[in-house]
Image: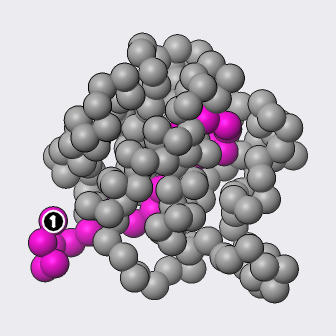
Amino acid sequence: MGEDQTMKLRKIVSGGQTGADQGALAACVQKNFPYGGWVPKGRRSEKGKVPHKYRMRQHWSRHYPPRTEKNVLDSDGTVIFTFGRPDGGSLLTIDFAKKHKRPWLAVDLLQPRCAAVAKVVRWIRRRLPDGAVLNVAGSRRSKAPGIHMAVKKVMGEVINREGGSGRETDQVPPRNTRKARKGRRG
């Protein structure tokens, strides 16, 4: 992407679950890229609670499907990362994207990372508007060990290519300090 082109991605949202969701959030934190999204009430995840280092909004429901649907609705498109075919919550995410006529892309991370990055970047450029909000979903850690790091690496490269850097926004995640946590709302 050339310096004079508009940046395709403005923000990444996720549901905060272990695995693919938190892998995308970790990439955003590492790249200082704007992120957000809805998590179940109580910050519920399969491992207990979504870590507070991730600045997320709590949905009124403690169940996963309502926050999944809200993240689909609040984004311009959804990428679903899995090892193999989508199942469980990943299929539900696809169903919500179809229901609300939002573009979606399933990415099997059994393919080489460079191929996964190229597939996501090509899809973003073809299907999403400039300044898009991208929802990232996929397998949870217990169903796909290693997916957190795989998604973090892929999304880190996607952010490098489609997210730009140094843009001012009120959604940039705060540093891990008490003062920053008290001063901002997710």
Is residue 14 part of the magenta span, yes or no? yes
Q: Residue at x 31, y 37 (%)?
A: 113
- Amino acid type for the residue under numbered disc 1: Met
Q: Is residue 7 left or right of residue 143?
A: left
Above or below 107: residue 182: below
Q: Is residue 101 left or right of residue 35?
A: left
Picture quarter containing residue 11?
Answer: bottom left
| Residue 106 visible in the picture | no
Residue beneath disc 1: 1
Q: Position of residue 164 (x, y in %)?
A: 31, 71
* Element under disc 1: loop
Pick the residue in front: 118 or 10: 118
Q: Is residue 37 left or right of residue 110?
A: right
* Secondary structure mostly taken by the magenta-highlighted segment of the chain: loop
Picture quarter containing residue 174?
Answer: bottom right
Above or below 44: residue 38: below
Q: Residue at x 37, y 23 (%)?
A: 110
The residue stretch that appears in magenta: 1-20
Q: Position of residue 161 (x, y in %)?
A: 26, 61
